[in-house]
Amino acid sequence: MLMVLGECHQNCREAARVYAERYPLQDNHSYNVFQRLALRVRTKGVVQPTYHINLHQELTVNDLQNRLNFCNWFVNTDLDFQLRILWTDEATFKSNGQMNLHNAHYWSPVNPHWLREVDYQHVWSLNTWCGLLGDRVIGPYFFEGTLNAATYTDFLVNILHQLLDDVPLNVRLSMWLQQDGCPAHFALRARQVLDQLFPGRWIGRGGPVQWPARSPDLTPNDFFLWGRIKDIVYQERPTTRQDMQERIRAVCASLSSDELLRAINNVRSR
C-alpha cells in the first residue's frame, strides 16, 4: 500500500483505485485508509496501528452452553429481577497500583517515557468484598489475609447480615445472592450456609442456579464497580492499608443511585 501510494504521488484517491485494480483479490481500501496510513507513517514512523491488548481467561468446551443456559433463564425472569439480586464479588487491591488484570489497561503508540515509582519489596494487598443491590452499594468489607473457605463462611454467617442492616426487611426476604465460582465460594460449608440464608435463591457454582464461569462481563461488579473504584483510588498512590480502605469507602459512598441503577439494568441488555 505504501509503494502504491508513492507511485501515485501521495494521491490517496488515486492510490485506492490503483490498489484495487492491481490486487483484486485483496480487500478494497478507501482513500481514508490510505490517508490514515500516510499520516501514521509520517507522524509516528510505524506502518501498523497500535493495539490495545486485554488479558482473558481461557474458555473451556462447556462455557458457551453454560452461558446460554444462564442467559435463557435470566431473560425469562421479571423485568426488574436484576434489581432484586445482591451481586457480589471480591477484588485484591495492591499498594503498587495493580489490581485484576482485566481492569488495568495501559497503551501508547510511542514510548511515553512514563515512570511510576514502585516498591516491590514492600508490596501489601487488600482483599475487598463488595455487593450491589438495586441502587445501593453493600459494603465494602475487607478480609484479613487470603480468602478461603473458612473466612468466607464466617463472613456469610457473621458479617453479611450486618452489612444488610439498612436494607428493608421485605427486600432482604425476597432478594437473591449472586457469586462466581472461586474455590472459597464452592466450599461445601459455604454452600450449606447459602442454602440456609437464601433457600433456592442464590446463583453460583453448585447453587440452585448455576453461574456461567468466566463471565465477568455479566456482573456489574466486574464491568463497572471495580474499574470505577480503581480509577479514583489509584489517582494517587495509597500510603497505608487504612488509607486505601478509606479511599474505597469514599468511592462507594460517592456513587449515585442513577449510576448504580444504570449499571445493574445493563446486565439484562448484556
Image (tube, rainbow, N blue to C red):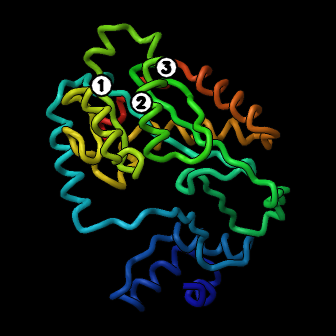
Residue designated by label 3: 163
Q: Earlier in the sequence, mark 1 or mark 3?
A: 3
Q: Going by the image, does 251 lie left or right of 238?
A: left
Disc 3 and disc 2: Cα gap in Å? Answer: 10 Å
Q: Are marks 1 and 2 in contact (CB under 8 Å)?
A: yes
Identify the residue under disc 2. Answer: 156
Residue drawn at x 21%, y 54% is 66
Q: Position of residue 206 (x, y in %)?
A: 24, 46
Marker count (numbered)? 3
Q: Which amino acid does the dot numbered 2 rest on?
A: Leu
Q: What is the C-alpha distance between the residues marked 1 and 2? A: 9 Å
Determine the secondary structure under disc 1.
helix
Q: Amino acid at mark 3?
A: Leu
Say above or below: 212 vs 74. Answer: below
CB atoms at circles 1 and 3 under 8 Å apart?
Answer: no
Mark 1 or 3: the one toward you: 1
**Residue at 30% over, 25% down:** 197
Quadrant position of residue 169: top left
> Which of these two is toward me, 131 or 254?
131
Q: Which residue is mark 1?
A: 197
Rendered location of residue 172, percent (x, y): 33, 15
Instruction: Tell which tag, 3 or 2, sits nearer the viewer.
Output: 2
First in sequence: mark 3 or mark 2?
2
